[in-house]
Image (cartoon, rainbow, N blue to C red):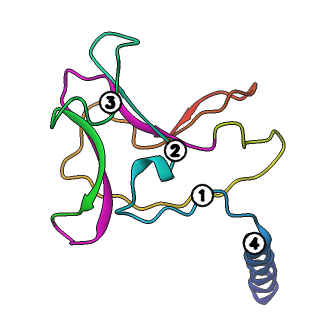
Amino acid sequence: MKFSATIFSLLFAQVLISIAQAALLIDYRGGEPANKLGNAELEGNALGCKIKNGKAGNAAFIRPGKDPKTGREALHLHRDPHFRRAEVKALGGQIKAGKTYYIGYEFRLRAKGESLVIFQWSVQLPIPTIPV
């Protein structure tokens, strides 16, 4: 039992050292404009119907604000059901094959939706899209 605790401690220390040495690619804090995080993309009901962020009123948007429940700064992504997507694409061209990346975030949903993808890792390399 003591041996496994020692191994766990060593592995945990190695992870902490790796994180400390890692380069920070994005440091986004809630309340900042979406373009600091990446490209904001909205899509209408028809595939390929691109809508500029801010041009769909309250039907679809990506904008900074405060979380109404916690009062914390946040980035609000919203789309009415007849819109296909409201997402922010980040790190275009900065991802390299064979590297390890850590993605940390927290979020809150008012209610869960059917077939809702919260986070999706997708790159333009021969790696499949992995919804989480």
Q: What residue type is labelled 1?
A: Ile
For the magenta stretch, what is the residue range?
69-91
Could you tell me how far apart the alpha carbons at marks 4 and 3 are, in whole angstroms?
34 Å
The percent position of residue 3, horizontal first and vertical second, equals 82, 85
Looking at the image, residue 12 lies above or below residue 62: below
Q: How crowded is mark 2: few (under 14 residues within 10 Å), some or many (20 or more)?
A: some
The residue to which callout 4 is attached is 15
Label 3: how many Cα within 10 Å (few below 14, some 14–19, many 20+): few
Asked which secondary structure carries label 2, the reply is loop
* Mark 4 residue crowding within 10 angstroms, few (<14) / some (14–19) / many (20+): few
What's the amino acid at mark 4?
Answer: Val
Cα distance in 3D space between marks 4 and 2: 27 Å
Quarter of the rendering containing residue 95: top right
Residue displayed at 16% across by 32% down:
59
Q: In which quarter of the image is the N terminus?
A: bottom right
Mark 2 near mark 1, Cβ–Cβ under 8 Å?
Answer: yes
Between disc 2 and disc 1, whose residue precedes? 1
Residue at image location 59% in from the left, 29% down from the top: 129
- Per the rendering, the mark at residue 26 is 1
Q: Which of marks 4 and 2 is nearer the N terminus?
A: 4
Residue receiving disc 3: 115
Which residue is pictured at 18% across the width and 30% down the height?
80
- Where disc 1 sits, the SS reads loop
In the depicted view, which residue is nearer to us: 89 or 8?
A: 89
Distance from disc 1 to disc 3, alpha carbons, whole Å, reads 28 Å
Q: Image height check: is 15 above or below 39? A: below
